[in-house]
Amino acid sequence: MAFTSIDQARDRYDVIVVGSGLGGLTCANRLARAGHSVLLLEHHIQLGGLATWFKRKGHIFDVSLHGFPYGMVKTCKKYWNKAIRDSIVQLNNIVFDNPQFSLTTTFSRDDFTRILQEKFGIARTVVEEFFSTVGRMNFFDDQTMTTRELFEKFFPGRTDVHRLLMEPITYANGSTLDEPAITYGIVFSNFMNKGVFTFQGGTDKLIGMMADELRKNGVTICTGARVDRIIVENGRVCGVQVGNRIIAAPSVVSNSGITNTVDNLAGREVFSPGFLEGFDSVKVNNSSCQVYFGLRPGESFPEVGDLLFTSTAEEFSSDEMLDMETKSRTFSVYYPKTRPQHPDYTVVASMNANYDDWAGLENDAYKAAKEAMIERCFMDLDRYIPGIREKVDWVEAATPRTFNRYTLHTRGTSFGTKFEGLDISRSIFKEVPGLFHVGSVGIIMSGWLGAINYGVIVANDVDGFLRC
Amino acid sequence: MTRDEIRDVILEIIEDIDEDADFDSLDADQPLRDQLDLDSMDFLDIVMELRKRYKLQIPEEEYPELSTLNSCVNYLEPKLKDS
Ligand SMILES: Cc1cc2nc3c(=O)[nH]c(=O)nc-3n(C[C@H](O)[C@H](O)[C@H](O)COP(=O)(O)OP(=O)(O)OC[C@H]3O[C@@H](n4cnc5c(N)ncnc54)[C@H](O)[C@@H]3O)c2cc1C
């Protein structure tokens, strides 16, 4: 992909989008289609933010292509194009394997209803009532009930059921049982609609198609362009500074994390004390670790499922899942069908992780911790793909430090902020006219679907502002 | 614009959003959301399109005015009378 160099960008645009995560890309595309001139600036050499991939020894590894809800079909068609929509395919075999239960599911409401009755002995009426309760949840509803209370109400004492319902969501967005139940209900219901879907052709193909669409709609794209500052004068946004260039614009959309946006890009001094008080209570989410395995050419393994939620921990615990030595991990298994244009077998192990556990390690200790993690993943993966050690020709680990380095996100956060971040992100343009934020916040606006839809919501705000 | 013209514009915008939308059995006094399978993102698209075409600013609090075809027409009629 060849992009414009920052030296060739014009001096002025209607809107500058800082960051090319799925939220930033979608917002840029919507605004360009609405007729505004748009400049998209990305610090990394590649577009996509956390929707990313990398190449090693002939393999292409996907970082965040583990699965998304069916809602992506409609969203991609409306806000991108039909070709993007047409590459979305279902993942049929979702596997759970832990000391409490082992099962395979399509992760849809019908299948969960069956499993909860047949395998867990829950009455159909209870299951139906649970689904309709979570299905009705809205983000503006009462937030006092926690997910733990929700589960206890419907399935008292059933830690096995709690695990089935919660574990995937904890991986998907870092939430715990103590989060507002509405955040659980919204995300869980999105998935239960029809199951788990993926993008055939891989993340590289998706982002390439998005870049083509942006160009077609006239967006100027610069990579390797790190915005140092969003310039605010007399309380209004007037542009950005990138190295020694100043580019003017009446509106700037930051797809950088909300904490970076306020603390570092705009600067705290441009906000009111009341806003900052709310802002200071925002907690960023956890980060991640991953281990990537690539199979030697000619090697293969039989179908073992597409997405495996595995754990040897006795019960579900979001704290256990964050531990450096967690016994809980997902394995995303990519077969030749994933990338028909580049058939390969790869596996990505993902774990939740705390930035602080990894940030302070000296070089040798850091290397050793990565090696130990790789070893634990090999041991677990060998249960599903026997002899995996002998089949691979590439293994590599990523840690919260890696995520921080590539996205600049505070503490390498994988899923933005907890619930309170949504309100701050939604109200930032009321504080500083022309300043908008898009990107993972509030748990519900994260993930591929959440980030894209949020890009559309913010584009509507910006469009309203520019046409005012 | 007349009431009929406004009505046609709304249906045209919805058709752009969902080409499979079936207007034959549409009841103009029942929520569009239930009959055409529209979600809150679709309503946002309608708002953005109206702004683009007629420079019309619809504040978030007033989105509920767009819930049925007739309520859309009633709400937009005074705003679009000179368009
Ligand atoms: C390991 C992992 C696995 C995941 N798996 C899934 C999954 O299977 N399904 C799913 O739906 N979601 C998944 N997610 C979540 C999903 O990837 C994210 O929620 C989503 O991609 C975030 O999009 P965003 O718009 O918030 O921006 P981000 O992807 O966070 O991107 C922000 C962009 O802004 C850029 N930027 C920041 N500061 C500056 C600056 N000053 N100047 C220029 N550019 C800047 C960054 O470089 C980055 O490109 C996963 C996340 C992780 C970490």
Image (cartoon, coloured by chain):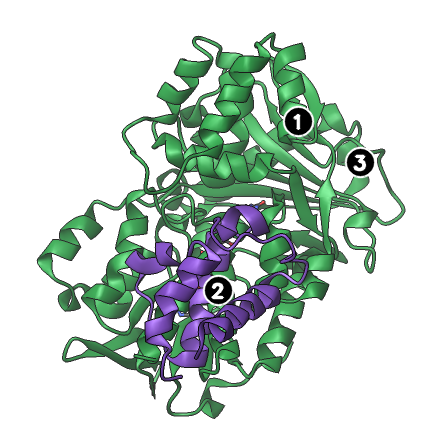
Chain colours: A green, B purple
Which disc, if any, is residue A390?
A: 3
Do marks 3 and 1 share a subunit?
Answer: yes
Q: Work out which quarter of the rendered image holds the N terminus of chain A and state it.
A: bottom right
| Residue drawn 52% across the image and 26% down it | A131
Asked if badges 2 and 3 are on one and the same chain, I answer no
Q: Is mark 3 within 8 Å of ligand 1?
A: no
Mark yes or no: residue A42 visible: no
Q: Residue at x 68, y 58 (%)?
A: B20
Q: Which mark is residue A122?
A: none
Amino acid at pointer 3: Glu
Question: How many neighbours does mark 3 have within 10 angstroms: few (below 14), some (14-19), or many (20 or more)?
Answer: few
Residue A449 percent coordinates (x, y)? 53, 51
Q: Chain of mark 3?
A: A
Residue shown at 59% from the left, 13% from the top? A124
Q: Which mark is residue A110?
A: 1
Quarter that holds the C terminus of chain A: bottom left
What residue is disc 2 on?
B45
Q: Secondary structure at mark 1?
A: helix
- Give the Cα distance between marks 1 and 2: 31 Å
